[in-house]
Amino acid sequence: MAIEDNPVSRRKYGEELKRRREDAGYTQEELSELTFISRTHLAHMEAGRRIPNVEDARRLDQALKTGGFFERFLPTLDGKAVAEHFEEALEFEGQAVVIREYAPKVVPGILQTEAYAKEVLDSGSTPKSDQERDQLLVTRLERSGILEDFDSPVVWAILDEAVLRRHVGGPAVMCEQLRHIVSLGEGRRIRVHVLPFSVGYHALMEGFVSLMWFKDQPPIAYVEGLKSGRVWEDPAVVRECQVAYDHALGDALSHRESLALIRSVAEEYEHAARTDQHP
């Protein structure tokens, strides 16, 4: 697909440009003067109607001190970058009207903040170049776009307590990540349930599971392990996964109790982050 034919990617590019401009404390007019890009063109880029050429992207990186991010971002706009075993599941995810996921160790992709996702991608067993990492990061952040529609898909997430307690990227990153989940839960965009350590062994202990339902096709299940993943369409297998999910849900904390726990752990991380800054 040509870059000009991918409006979703253009929009994500624009959102990232606006966020980083605002984080740097610049108005559009100020960034225009620094980069020699017209304010109108910048406005169109932030709205997802235009993308920069390579030279403009380099000037944006220099002005915003983004280390080449926007130049590396350009090749990602005409395709998605995901692990090969997840490609089929990604297509289903974009069509689903209901998604129910269980995460044993890491926050599910559609709920990840940029800082958390970047740490996950940087910490893989196979070293990645900055461009490879950024391609994966862009796709990871694009996936969260399915939550922009308040009504669809309906998303439930069961998180093992290990997801909350495992330090990914340090206290500040974890605090931001957990508060993002709380915000989605308090805003009624998702339902979240924590499986506390006190439950012990439970029905979904063995790995990540994503259940998806659709308007005009049977439900599917996606299960994932180390460097592997599989989409199951066999009704018997899908039903087994659904039953296991229901059993685990029965062992989990309520939505309200889960939000309270996540909020409490986020506060612990916030305190730790302050201590790190002011020993």
Image (spheres, rainbow, N blue to C red):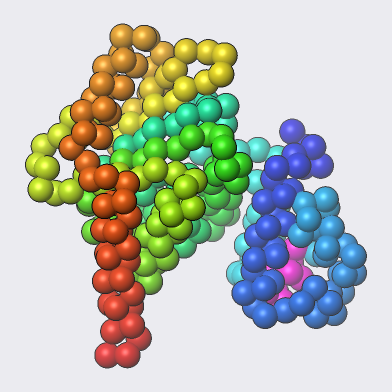
Q: Is residue 25 above or below residue 114?
A: below
Query: Magenta span has 60?
Result: yes
Q: Position of residue 278 (x, y in %)?
A: 32, 90
Q: Position of residue 86 (x, y in %)?
A: 46, 31
Q: Which residues are magenta?
A: 57-64
Q: Is residue 247 above or below residue 13?
A: above
Q: Is residue 267 visible?
A: yes
Residue at position x 72%, y 50% in the image: 11
Residue 199 horizontal side relative to residue 86, left or right: left
Residue toward you, 265 or 84: 265
Q: Position of residue 147 (x, y in %)?
A: 55, 44
Q: How many marks?
A: 0
Q: Quadrant location of the N terminus?
A: top right
Give the image quarter of residue 24: bottom right
Give the image quarter of residue 180: bottom left
Residue at position x 26%, y 58% in the image: 261
Q: Is residue 170 visible?
A: no
Residue 137 horizontal side relative to residue 26, left or right: left
Query: Magenta span has 181?
Result: no
Residue toward you, 221 or 182: 182
Residue at position x 64%, y 69% in the image: 20
- Magenta part mainly helix, strand or loop? helix
Q: Quadrant location of the C terminus?
A: bottom left
Residue toward you, 152 or 131: 152
Residue at position x 56%, y 18% in the image: 215
Residue 132 horizontal side relative to residue 25, left or right: left
